[in-house]
Image: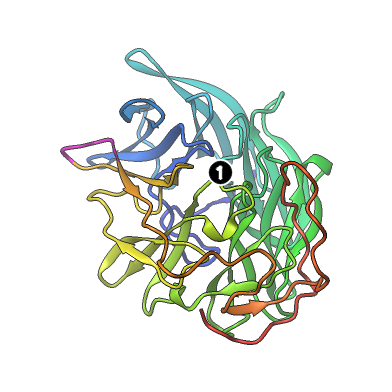
Amino acid sequence: MTACAIEPSAANEDDGAPRAGCTITADGSYAARLARDGDSWFPERWTLDGPEPYAVPLPGHQPEEPGTEVQPMGDGRVLIRRLVDGRHTFSLLYPTGPGTGELLLGAVECPTEDTRLRLLPPAPGGGRAYALAVGRRSTAVWLVAGGAFGPEHLAELPGRCSGGVWLDRTGRMLALDREAGGRTKAVVVDLGRGGEVSPLLQIAAHSDDRVLLADPDSGLLLIRSDAPSPGEGRLGWGVLGSTLPVRFPECLRVPECAVTPFAIQPGQALMPESCAVALRFDGPLGSWVGVWRPDERHVHHLPAPEGWLAGAGLWTPAGVLRLPYATEAVPCGVAGVGLPPAEAGVPPAPTGVRSESTGVRSESEKPAEPEPPGPVVPRPVPLREAPLGRLVTK
């Protein structure tokens, strides 16, 4: 029997970004985290869609290991992944009066000792959960909750994959960052077609291009790439299905700080430039929150609430950023931060006009065709032929 390693919980090995203090469902109804009681760790579920947030502890028969992963499901149960006798076991936890109920789902055994397995971000709909097992030469996608017969192997992808961003509201299109030939490029995995893989993002032939965050409503995409500054990963943005270039605003470069986007304002259909993006800043002075819109030239820097579960939060469609926090006085709280007013004198960049920024043109330079009537769902468009544009900072 071969054990496979547990993905570290303190930092994201994909790009060094620290992990969030809790995980929130795609619709913002529930959150889950490992809470601490002295030297012991136990799962905790937060309910966020009621009049007041509240937490329910879900301790098992023994304390959990610090690297154990938990993830909230759409029905309020909590998925937990444990390493037991060399296998990754999955269970659903739920409150049962004074105790914790547990539904065993099954286990996944990795083929080699150095294979790393971790949960992917919560899928849209909340009824399914997925995991990524990364081996030496290939990556497996597993359905670990929501299937008919326990964990189900969905796809085997060549290359080592990292990241994990959902591109649609159905939980079918998954963006992963695949390492091949010494470079990392974002690809799309179609789970509805047996894991069919197609290119999503290639800014330059020798750049590392990762997808960090996506909003299915507007098509706004946050990426990290070293194309404009070789050796330095920079934050940029683009739009799914657009022929406009990927842009790298200068305001997202903060010396001696790690900048990680963690939430995009939903409900802004066909308005990607106006979407508010929440950013986590980690530097020598600690962690704080930033709010930025693609059509603005600066970031609004805000203090994080005391006890913020750093890197966790979600936007409401109305533009309120909800940040979960826990202190000794308030063990389960959510702070609301209003959306700063739009930058005066700077109208949103109209669709079809290149704004001032570091740009990378997409593979198609022809004018966009007229939009069809009715709502338009952005589709992933491969940008593998996109050459690096001229460097103009925004």
* Type of amino acid under label 1: Gly
Give the magenta-colored segment's residue range: 328-334
Which quadrant of the rendered structure holds the N terminus? Answer: top right
Main secondary-structure element of the magenta-colored stretch: loop
Query: Closer to the camera, 287 or 344?
Result: 344
Query: Closer to the camera, 352 or 159?
Result: 352
Furthest residue toward top: 97
Res 255 quadrant in image: bottom left
Is residue 88 something that shows in the picture?
yes
Residue 340, given in percent of the width and then of the height, sits at 36, 57
Q: Height in image: 351 above or below 315? A: below
Q: Residue at x 36, y 78 (%)?
A: 256
Residue 106 on the magenta span: no
Q: Residues within 10 Å of mark 1 (few under 14, many from 20)?
A: some
Q: Residue at x 59, y 50 (%)?
A: 215
Is residue 2 something that shows in the picture?
no
